Image: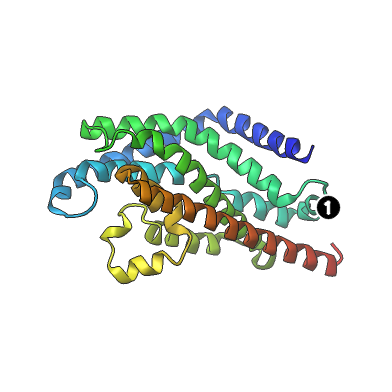
Amino acid sequence: MATYKYLKFFQVAFKQSMSYRGATYGRFVFYGVILFIFSRLWLVVGNKITGELSATDMVWYLSFTELIVLSTPLLHMDIEEDIRSGNIAYLFIRPTNYIFKLFSEGMGQFCARMLVLLLAGFLFPLLFTGKLPSHPLALAVFPPLALMAGGLYILIQICVGLSAFWLQDSSPVQWVTQKFLFILGGMILPLSMYPMWAQKLANLTPFPAMLALPATGALLLDGSLLLNVVGKLILWFVLLSLLALGIFRQCEKNLSINGG
């Protein structure tokens, strides 16, 4: 019965997100502009850079990482609003778990956005480069990895949003987290192009599992690498889930001490 409730949260969020056509078209256009700019860059200088990926694959790499970023809803804003309005006290005592509810709704929005943006993510790189990835099967391998990566990003968003319980404003935490994601996550460049010390630092965080690893794993299509990617996705999902639940428990405790 509990599982059914969370499936309903997923379903409602999915339908609502699909109905926001204006926002969807905006993301579609923004996606195309970003890929066009960077495709011109990589096709000019990409062949002069040695690495795991070709210039064409670099465009596909950016398409994959951007797909995850653009598909992920900014849940921290919803959580912050719940806290500021005082609704959080009511939501905490509902029979449904607040964290599970947020995650279900987040995944519903993520799936709806990704379903639409997949078309852009596959069409624009093909249009701008005239080529499929070196391993065309990457187009089938990436979506399930992206779903798992999206789950990690949503958990990060939940943790960021809950910080507003103490800070009132989660935007500074979101700003820092986003910069870590873009840099340590390898949004534009694969981690293999980073200095070794930066690679080691990045691999101590969950951010590569959210962007670089799914994109690189799909494009290189190496069996052992894919197993490593899936393993890290699962590991970080467990750790971030525990972190989100731990922060939630502390929020509940503080709310109880302060009398709601």
Q: Residue sitting at 27 percent across and 67 percent down?
A: 195
Q: Position of residue 36 (x, y in %)?
A: 27, 39
Residue 163, picture quadrant: bottom right
Residue 215 lies, with reference to residue 113, above or below; the image says below
Quadrant where the image shows the C terminus: bottom right
Q: Residue furthest front?
A: 224
Residue at image location 32% in from the left, 58% down from the top: 191
- In this picture, residue 45 sits left or right of residue 75: left
Using the image as rendered, state which of residue 26 and residue 59 is in the foreground.
59
Quadrant housing residue 40: top left
In this rendered view, identify the residue nearer to me: 227 or 67: 227
Colouring: rainbow
Choose between 108 and 37: the one closer to the eye. 108
| Residue 244 horizontal side relative to residue 172, left or right | right
The residue under label 1 is which amino acid type? Ile
Residue under the image location 78 percent in, 68 percent down: 254
Q: Is residue 84 left or right of residue 192?
A: right
Specify the farthest residue to the right. Answer: 259
Q: Residue 22: where, in percent of width, then height?
A: 50, 30
Percent x, y of residue 231 = 48, 53
Question: Which residue sits at x=58%, y=60%?
Answer: 239
For the N terminus, the quadrant is top right
Residue 228 appears in which quarter of the rendering? Answer: bottom left
Judge by depth and name the residue closer to the eye, 129 or 170. 129
Q: Which residue extends farthest bottom? A: 197
Residue at label 1? 93
Give residue 151's position: percent from left, percent from top: 55, 47
- Considering the numbered disc 1 on the image, is that residue within a helix, a strand or a loop? loop
Let me know if residue 175 appears in the view. yes
